[in-house]
Amino acid sequence: MSIRRPSKEQPENFEFNSASLEAAKSIAEKYPKDKKESAVMALLYIAQKQNSNWIPLAAMKYIGKFLDMPYIKVYEVATFYTMYNLAPVGKYFIQVCTTTPCMIRGAHKLVEACKEKISENENKLSKDLSCSWMEVECLGACVNAPMMQINDEYYEDLNKGKTLKILDIILSGETPKPGSYRGRINNEPENNRKTLMDLKNA
Amino acid sequence: MLKLKVNEIDIEVEEGLTVLQACEKAGVEIPRFCYHEKLSIAGNCRMCLVELEKSPKPVASCAMPAAEGMNIKTNTEFVEKARKGVMEFLLANHPLDCPVCDQGGECDLQDQSMFYGVDKSRYKENKRAVSEKNMGPLIKTQMTRCIHCTRCVRFATEVAGVTEIGAIGRGEDMEITTYLEQSMQSELSANVVDLCPVGALTSKPYVFEARPWELKKTESIDVMDAIGSNIRIDTYGWEVKRILPRINEDINEEWISDKTRYACDGLLNQRLDTPYIKYNGKFEKASWIEVFNIIKSKFKNANKDKICGMSGDLVNMETLYIFKEFFNKTLGSYNVESRSDHTYLNPQNRENYLFNSTINGIEEADFILLIGSNPRYEATILNARIRKAYLQNKTKIISLNDIGDLTYPYEFLDGDIENIKKITEDNHKISNLIKEAKKPLIIFGQSSLKTKSAKYIVESVKSFLRKNKKISEEWNSLNTISENASTVGSFDLGLYKTVDGSNEVLKDLENHMFEIVYLLGVDNLKFKKKDEFIIYQGSHGDKGAEIADIILPGAAYTEQNGYFTNLEGKMQKAYKASYPPEEAKEDWLIINELAEAMNHRKLFNDKDELDSSLLNQINLHIKKSKSIKPLNVENLEFKQEILKVNNEDYYYSNAIARASKTMFECKSAKTNLKLTGTEG
């Protein structure tokens, strides 16, 4: 984990759009009036979603004002949690799992594909600024290893060829279909079920 | 009461204490970094580990409440090992740069690692390096040294009330910083330098100046405001190197304002070191005998009604007393005044110009009304107390004006004097708030005393309070924030000439009625000189010296013993830490010698005689003041007026501060920040 710093290039202003504002309000309402600050994490996440996967300083300030709390406190939270991105990561934010199960199933091939298609280094935007990739620790989909996450969706059972294809779709500006790329439904056993045969909905 | 054992010694402590406090009561010292009795408990340095019977692991004593029957051990091998372990972790990333660190010699980490640590390091990996942070013109940072005790964060949030410091990142990458590295916007900011147990936050103006063991330490009293903060002056030869706070729970607790701490470099600049005489608009050096002779002949030829004396803001009471004696006895004049503007004064009784509820009393108050006062700038330490009261009791605070950020929330009115009229006529919601409050606090600021309606404001509120029995033996809700360190002392000694609260001497001075004006350290006087012959006595070449015809070089507050009475009426003695430069002399001595030159008789034989005479005078005054039954002033005239609170130029309020480079930097840091518009 490296030191996370806010991006040097920052937008001047940030404001919630109407959908975000509604979501933010409904979350802030859940807390007692004098404990509004508790909503900060959810609001940061909303801001991140709205602002193509990263949180500018202006958004932290906006949230500070929104919740009536000091800016430094929002800043502390945003820098503490690694899932808040403080610099642009592109519209498609790719997280490749490289923890042991994925690694022994060939996660480095996925990394190679990302290096070829997107950028030589982690956390660097692609040429068209639409996406970036980074290695992350276990995303909890070991049964479908190797896998990667693009924004909110998991792409599983990958190999280098499949990854390259997915990345091509992304770079052309479309969203690929999430899920297993070996035709599995979720994480069901390959070549049919072998246990709990008598249960229909298992 | 709880009964517990510390190192097999039985003790009894009150409930609500922590194990660490219980150990302290038992006289056992426990090392600590993050724990500070004036701040909330963090429990993150782990240095205070102790052994607790029946607890398999060592316990952080600062965060553990003491309980009945506890058996605490602090001298076992188990504890020793725990402390060594913690120390090793703390030192893992701490640089070994003590020889170039300003904290060296007074560093908690240094001392405690000598005492509790291991003599060698097993850590061979690379040490963490953290970039320096900007925290403004007062605080130098060297964040690699930081051990993340978060004392500074807690101080800024809790005591100073400016949530600007925080810890960003996490784990090994955690860093303490101000928001986007802006300078800290507080008048108490430099207290974090004292709080920092290591050399991460050190004093910028004091950087590489001296080692603590080289300095002569003198305990004294501050004069930058009327609070009378207790300070320690550290000197190296003549030079005042730094000023640190001393603990006085009744006044400044452990804190001092930035001005108190850093205006001291003004003591080195702009000093008057020899007598001067003005010839053709130019000052020329002279000897004491020469200037005394000129003054003597001037006084001899002048009508005594055409002579006046004014005393300034930083003058100690001995000097004020002898100054008055000199005018009354030697010159036979009664034109002596200490106010350099038209401040309303009712000298009938001492309570009229004191902060009667006392600074400690603020914490008991249940309602606070500010009338024309911005305590944040007028009395920073007092403002910190009001904040403390607010945090403890959620005290309701109302100000007559909107005066900006006071570090605590308050309601405000529109500033119209009409409000005062309504309040005192029992016709306002605040009237009820005052009446219902058991211990209300009405604070008059300087701005309210300088208005045309000052008399109306003060006297009508006073009679309202008296009518509702809010001024009594137990609780006196009438409070005035005095402007300067010498204000209360001057009033106690009777350095005023007033009819109905006015400033008669200043009025005459403005009408150019005087031929000779003797200014004793007066630098805040706004006065256009005409034909007056002006004698200035003081320590700094400031506004007063500029208009003078003769300059008598005096001593600053660090260079002479002297009493100061603070705004509560507490008399405290400031001690001599240094000596006046070159030809300059202590202020009382100059006047005594001048008196001798005038009519061959000293006013006092020595300082002791002056001191005892002064103390007698003050005791008499206090006794007399107590015996006077205060009268309500009748026939008050109401005038429509909007009260404005002048945000006085905080960093430039007196001659010493104006000569200080650090104060100039503070001022420009503040104005720059406003210009760039980076604030909220």
Image (tube, coloured by chain):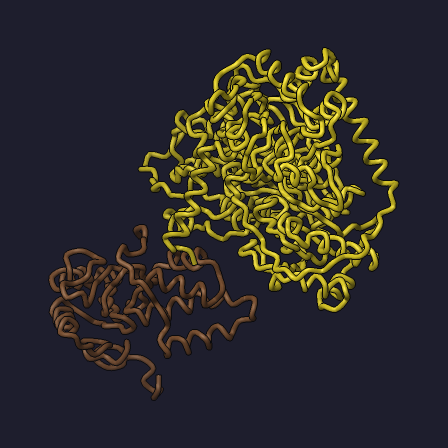
Chain colours: A brown, B yellow
Q: Nearer the viewer, residue B238 or B65?
A: B238
Residue found at the far bottom of this picture: A200
Q: Where does residue B643 sit, x and y in percent of width and height? A: 61, 57
B226 or B274: which is nearer to us?
B274
Percent across and percent down for residue A151 are 27, 70
The residue nearer to you, when weighing B2 against B109, is B109
Q: Is residue B635 left or right of residue B64?
A: right
Locate residue B598: give its quadrant: top right
Q: At 53% across and 36% down in the image, what residue appears? A: B194
Left or right: B384 with respect to B323? left
- What residue is shown at x 57% (from left), y 45% (from top)? B60
* Number of numbered callouts drawn: 0
In the image, B329 versus B7, the foreground residue is: B329
The percent position of residue B192, horizontal first and vertical second, equals 51, 41
Among the 4 quarters of the image, the one containing residue B131 = top left
- Residue B602 shown left or right of residue B619 in the figure: left
Horizontal side of residue B608 vs B670, given as left or right: right
Counting from the top left corner in percent of width and height, residue B628 is at 87, 42
**Rendering quarter of residue B335:** top right
Image quarter where the C terminus of chain B lies is bottom left
Q: Is residue B482 visible?
A: yes
From where the camera sits, is residue B388 visible? Answer: no
